[in-house]
Amino acid sequence: MKIFMPKRIKLCLCAGAICALGIIIFLIARSASESNKAELWELVYKRKRQNPDEYTIYIQEDGIYEPYLVIDGDYGGGVLLLRKHLTNETVLFKGIGLHYDEDESRERHPRYYPASDVDAYLRAIFLPKFPSALQDSILDTTLSVAKKDADVNFNRGTEPIERKVFLLSVTELNEREGSTACVEGVPLAFYKDGNPISATHKHGMDGKYWLRSTFFGQGGLIMAFFVGHKWDNPHDWVASGAPVGYEFFLRPAFCLSPDSPIEQAAFNGETVYILSQ
């Protein structure tokens, strides 16, 4: 039996179907868009032998995207990002070539990280490489450093300082301490899991890099900690001491808020995560 349906009702049903289809398409598109976005805490390193691509985010430096490892989710309340590759420039831990302030302690306490050339370089030269909006988003992070009057015999005290960009300590790398270092912070799970402390440049060649830790010992030489391979084994990397007048590369770190928005983007033919603009 043929059912008669007024033309007006047919038009209403047709319009309703089109409207419903439009809503479905909108919801699908929105879902796809939302799945492309996330928050930074979701990228934090989680387990041994995890694929580094899963905890890597790309950050702009001087307009060029550089990979950073998201290695800790609660570093003083922030998410800790560590530059995957070494800087192109080498820097003295403490020398006479860089003078960014008039702090007289620079000359009297050459092993003191807050008065070092590496700290000055990070604040005055490296930090401005980031876009201004990112510089504003970087958290002021409280770090533990050896006091300026720390010595090998009786005074192993530390003090807190605040920095936006900084170097990791020998303690945080879960490396040797004993008679050669103060305890600055706690070992990071990333390194307790056995992830390598060695680092390379973008072209693949490895290099030595400074830490923020004072090194005690070695017959009164003024020294700080760095990461490099043993002289008799290029495959065995350790943290050891070197005179502050040596030049090594840097491996900067900084913290962002856990809810910093991130999104997927195409980069060099791959899909990676970047900070949302």
Image (spheres, rainbow, N blue to C red):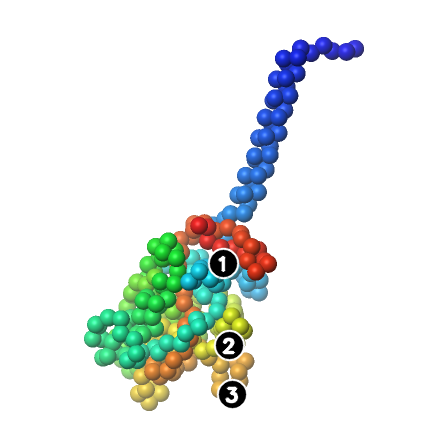
Closest to the observer: 31 or 194? 31
Closest to the observer: 132 or 84? 132
SS class, disc 1: strand
Q: Residues within 10 Å of mark 2 (few under 14, many from 20)?
A: some
Is residue 257 left or right of 19 when viewed as pictured? left
Residue 36 in view here: yes
Position above or below: 53 against 167: above
* Mark before the other along the chain sequence, 1 or 3: 1
Residue at 60% from the left image edge and 34% from the top image edge: 25
Is residue 154 left or right of 183 when viewed as pictured? left
SS class, disc 3: loop
Disc 1 to disc 3, C-alpha distance: 35 Å
Residue type for callout 1: Ile
- Which label is found at residue 206? 2
- Which label is found at residue 57? 1
Position above or below: 261 against 117: above
Residue 98: name its quadrant: bottom left
Residue 70, horizontal then vertical, whole percent: 47, 60
- Considering the image in quadrants, where does the N terminus appear? top right
Q: Residues within 10 Å of mark 3 (few under 14, many from 20)?
A: few
Residue at 53% from the left image edge and 52% from the top image edge: 264
Residue type for callout 2: Asp
SS class, disc 2: loop
